[in-house]
């Protein structure tokens, strides 16, 4: 019988035997053979056999790990998908990166990233769902620009929150979403509402209170009252702020109690909310205090307003939200007067000042240099109480020469007052302002006008830019307005811009090369408007 020899089988061993095999493989079996392997020609083969056996032993001896829980799939998004053309446009907008150009000249190409907010607003208005493959780029864009986050999260829907739980870079989406992205209980789930309110995280409770307030103002107020006494001061402040939504007379008893709160900030917020209710007791108290400080002097040839500012800030004034300590550089009496007038219902003044209209009251002279202080307080009151008649009176005509003056007629105050007017009236007023004062002072006012700009405002902006070009100034003096025009002009204005894209003949006093810069700027504006028109059409394309 023919006998064949087989390599000796390696003996079972622990982890040390594996290290011995590795060492022998590195040094070579001619120099070192591991135990259980005979030296000689067959040693390399025996070494590999031993390593294979040991590998199987090592694998067989491993304890299986606990299986990870399977991810829950993302919630379904029931909204319709984007039209293919709009989806391709989104990819282009997200692929654009700012700051890639060289130097200060932008050329004639549109700034695509600046068109993304408008694109998102249109997509949300149509109710489309975001393409799943675009979600990472959308979240990255929103991560870098906080102004994009509300629109991006509304467009991205529940899948964005699902992704945000898996990527720390996108956790901002969970912080921005109501309740951290968790589904809030509905109106028919009182037990879930109670449990979440009593046991939820602070962000979840804020989101819950806001959601309940939006659909049931009294229910939200009652919910807040159940735990009000035990809440922290900073939490009470945030919860109280939610009552701005649907603020009404029924909130007055709760807010009156909050006037006695331990926290000064809570007391101030409660007083501000009560002052926005003209029929509230606090508004009546403030009207009485303010009325005792302001009167008509009939002893003069021309009636004039006289002011006697408060001489002290008593405990009742403090309880009603008047801050006793004036800021640095501000007189105490004028500081107290401003707060009283700001919180008094604007209807007070017609009765107090002889039945005059807001326009007539604002036109009255004010004695002893109190005019700016008084008008500024009336301006804040008009903004707080959303009173368009007083806003019109304080705004005056667009041609008023005090456009850059102090008090209620400063540009900052005018911008706030314009916000209380209806959009068409607002645009018409700003158009009149530009026609008289030009664009250099109008940037702040343009920012409060709705997009796209109404026809008279768009025409006024284009005409003013044309005048600036003819004057020979450089276009980058108006770069801010140009940037706004690219985003806010009605695309229909493109027809009027075509004639402005040609390089004009430069006059002797014109800045060198200004004409070509203007032509380039108008060409970029024209290109951007046409692109916006195309973008709009893509949302309804078949």
Image (tube, grey):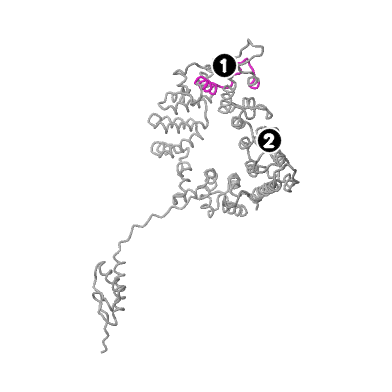
What residue range appears in magenta?
A: 332-359
The residue identified by callout 2 is 438
Label 2, label 1: how far apart the Cα atoms are? 36 Å
**Up-down: is 198 above or below 80?**
above
Local SS, label 2: loop
Measured from the top left, where is residue 13 in percent x and y? 24, 69
User: Looking at the figure, which quarter contains the N terminus?
Assistant: bottom left
Q: Is residue 36 left or right of residue 410?
A: left
Residue at figure coordinates x 45%, y 40% from the top left:
185
Is 338 included in the stretch rendered in magenta? yes
Q: Nearer the viewer, mark 2 or mark 1?
A: 2
Please give the name of the residue rendered at 39% of the width and 29% of the height, measured from the top-left corner. 229
Q: Name the disc covering residue 307, or none.
A: 1
Q: Is residue 128 above or below residue 329?
A: below
Q: Is residue 193 above or below residue 540?
A: above
Q: Is residue 287 left or right of residue 17?
A: right
Residue 5 at x, y = what percent? 26, 83
Looking at marks 2 and 1 on the same chain, the residue that comes earlier in the sequence is marked by 1
User: Callout 1: few (<14), some (14-19), or many (20+) C-alpha neighbours within 10 Å?
Assistant: many
Instruction: Using the rendered view, name the quadrant where residue 443 is placed.
Output: top right
Alpha-carbon neighbours of circle 2 within 10 Å: few (<14), some, or many (≥20)?
some
């Amino acid at each position: 019988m023919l006998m064949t020899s087989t390599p000796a089988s390696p003996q079972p061993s622990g982890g040390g035997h594996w290290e011995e095999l590795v060492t022998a493989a590195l040094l070579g079996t001619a120099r070192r053979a591991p135990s259980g392997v005979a030296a000689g020609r067959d040693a390399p083969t025996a070494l590999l056999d031993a390593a294979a056996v040991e590998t199987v032993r090592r694998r067989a001896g491993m304890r299986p790990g606990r299986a990870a829980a399977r991810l829950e799939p993302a919630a379904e998004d029931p909204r319709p998908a984007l039209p293919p053309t709009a989806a391709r446009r989104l990819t282009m907008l997200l692929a654009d990166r700012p700051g890639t150009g060289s130097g200060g000249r932008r050329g004639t190409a549109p700034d695509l990233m600046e068109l993304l907010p408008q694109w998102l607003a249109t997509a949300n208005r149509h109710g489309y769902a975001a393409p799943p493959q675009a979600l990472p780029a959308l979240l990255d864009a929103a991560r870098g620009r906080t102004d994009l986050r509300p629109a991006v999260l509304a467009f991205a829907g529940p899948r964005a929150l699902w992704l945000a739980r898996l990527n720390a870079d996108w956790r901002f989406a969970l912080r921005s979403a109501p309740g951290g992205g968790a589904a809030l209980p509905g109106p028919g789930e009182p037990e879930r509402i109670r449990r979440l309110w009593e046991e939820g995280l602070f962000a979840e409770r804020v989101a819950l209170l806001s959601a309940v307030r939006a659909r049931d103002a009294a229910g939200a107020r009652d919910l807040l009252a159940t735990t009000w006494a035990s809440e922290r001061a900073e939490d009470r402040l945030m919860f109280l702020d939610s009552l701005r939504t649907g603020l009404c007379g029924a909130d007055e008893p709760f807010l009156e109690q909050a006037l006695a709160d331990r926290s000064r900030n809570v007391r101030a917020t409660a007083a501000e909310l009560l002052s926005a209710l003209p029929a509230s007791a606090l508004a009546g108290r403030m009207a009485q205090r303010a009325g005792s400080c302001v009167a008509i002097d009939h002893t003069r040839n021309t009636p004039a307003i006289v002011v006697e500012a408060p001489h002290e800030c008593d405990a009742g004034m403090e309880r009603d939200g008047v801050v006793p300590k004036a800021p640095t550089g501000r007189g105490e009496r004028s500081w107290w007067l401003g707060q009283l007038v700001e919180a008094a219902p604007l209807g007070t003044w017609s009765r107090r000042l002889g039945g005059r209209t807001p326009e007539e009251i604002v036109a009255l002279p004010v004695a002893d240099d109190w005019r700016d202080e008084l008008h500024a307080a009336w301006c804040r009151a008009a903004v707080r109480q959303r009173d368009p008649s007083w806003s019109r009176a304080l705004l005056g005509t667009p041609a008023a020469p005090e456009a850059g003056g102090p008090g209620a007629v400063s540009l900052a105050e005018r911008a706030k007052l314009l916000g209380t007017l209806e959009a068409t009236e607002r645009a018409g007023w700003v158009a009149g302002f530009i026609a008289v004062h030009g664009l250099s002072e109008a940037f702040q006012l343009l920012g409060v006008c709705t997009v796209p700009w109404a026809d008279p405002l768009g025409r006024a902006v284009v005409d003013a830019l044309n005048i600036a070009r003819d004057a020979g100034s450089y276009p980058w003096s108006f770069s801010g307005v140009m940037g706004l025009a690219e985003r806010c002009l009605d695309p229909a204005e493109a027809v009027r811009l075509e004639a402005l894209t040609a390089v004009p003949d430069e006059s002797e006093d014109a800045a060198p090369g200004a004409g070509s810069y203007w032509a380039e700027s108008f060409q970029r504006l024209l290109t951007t408007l046409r692109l916006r028109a195309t973008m709009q059409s893509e949302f309804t394309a078949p």
